[in-house]
Image (cartoon, coloured by chain):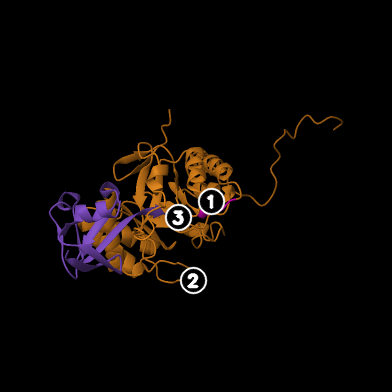
Chain colours: A orange, B purple
Amino acid sequence: MNTDTLLIAGKTFQSRLIIGTGKYPSNAVMAKAHEASGADMVTVAVRRVNISDRSKESLLDYIDTSKMFILPNTAGCYTADEAVRTARLAREAGLSNWVKLEVIGDERTLFPDNEQLIEATRVLVKEGFVVLPYTTDDPVVCRKLEDAGAAAVMPLGAPIGSGLGIQNPNNIRIIREFSRVPVIVDAGVGTASDATFAMELGADAVLMNTAIAGAQDPVAMAEAMKLAVRSGRLAHLAGRIPRKLYATASSPVEGLVGR
Amino acid sequence: MTVLTITLNGDRYDVPEPVTVTALLESLSIDARRVAVEHNLVILKRFAFDQTLVREGDNVEIVNFVGGG
């Protein structure tokens, strides 16, 4: 029985790994990767239905919604207004009031526009949304988001899809210290050790998409991420030893033969 | 038969008049339970699909969930 559950806005999740549904080689591979990951929350995007070509299969046919909580995002939105509109549509399409709030400020880096993000958070919280904003790894912005009513803060580890790993571990630690809501490291993970590192720093969860979907074997990587997140979480809870410059012997220094 | 022209997901689209949102979705083979519909910038509750009439020149957006991160 897992007692180390993730609690966001009164809802309990068994896994501290949250994964995406984009960029998989196929929906079938995605479904297998989801299974292997142990995740119980997945992100989705909101887009226009393709009117001229209705042949494409529905994403939801490949997500077991009895096990998976669907977290719609506002990816691709560049203003608070666009993001709010998308969030409202997502609520009607999915019948949940949760949203991963993204307001992008720059095309090349996909860094968030924090000013618009805070504004959109304020609006959506007033409308009863559970808002999980994707933000830069800035402790002050995270505090403002929390003050605006965010249910969690989701600082980036590195740019979306970059696979660079956690670029500013000190900020993630500071954000964890400052925050009274869960801290979810969102974006930038490249491989399992990045996820472990994020969890060791004290993150409450890690959200990733490309690291799994873009791996040569997404299903194997999904399992690796499941173990990595669990491993980092356990190490964080266990409390690591302090770093020291010089050695401390592990074996007794007395009783050596011939001395 | 009267034909009316609407803007559907950004494109010009002809529908026979009169048409409710429910009928429009049916004619497009779209499962109403899996989409959200915005009618002239107003997001419709699902129960309103039956009563909402699409008229000449209206703007309709139909969105669903796709893969994303």
Label 3 lies in what chain? A
Please identify the quarter of the rendering in which residue B7 is found. Answer: bottom left
Judged from the image, the secondary structure of the residue bearing numbered disc 2 is: loop
Q: Chain of mark 2?
A: A
Residue A146 lies left or right of residue A167; in this view the side is left
* Mark earlier in primary sequence (2, 3): 2
Q: Amino acid at mark 2?
A: Arg
Q: Position of residue A244 (x, y in %)?
A: 63, 50
Which stretch appears magenta? A210-215
The residue positioned 16% from the left and 49% from the top of the image is B47
Q: Are marks 1 and 2 on the same chain?
A: yes
Q: Which element carries disc 3, helix, strand or loop?
A: strand
Mark positioned earlier in the residue sequence (3 or 1)? 1
Q: Is residue B31 magenta?
A: no
Judging from the image, what secondary structure is the residue with disc 1 in?
Answer: loop
Neighbour tally class for label 3: few under 14, some 14-19, many 20 plus, Cα within 10 Å: many
User: Looking at the image, which is closer to me, A8 or A83?
Assistant: A83
User: Distance from label 3 to label 1 (Cα)?
Assistant: 22 Å
- Please, is residue A191 above or below residue A78 in the view? above
As measured in the structure, the alpha-carbon distance from the residue carrying label 2 to the one carrying label 3 is 17 Å
Specify the farthest residue to the front: B1
User: Where does residue A231 sit, x and y in percent of width and height?
Assistant: 54, 40
Q: Do the numbered discs 1 and 2 sit on residues whose CB atoms are within 8 Å?
A: no
Foreground residue among A233 and B3: B3
Quickly name the residue at label 2: A108
Q: Which residue is the site of mark 1?
A: A25
* Of callouts 1 and 2, the N-terminal one: 1
Type of amino acid under label 1: Pro
User: Which residue is farthest left?
Assistant: B51
Mark 3 — residue? A186
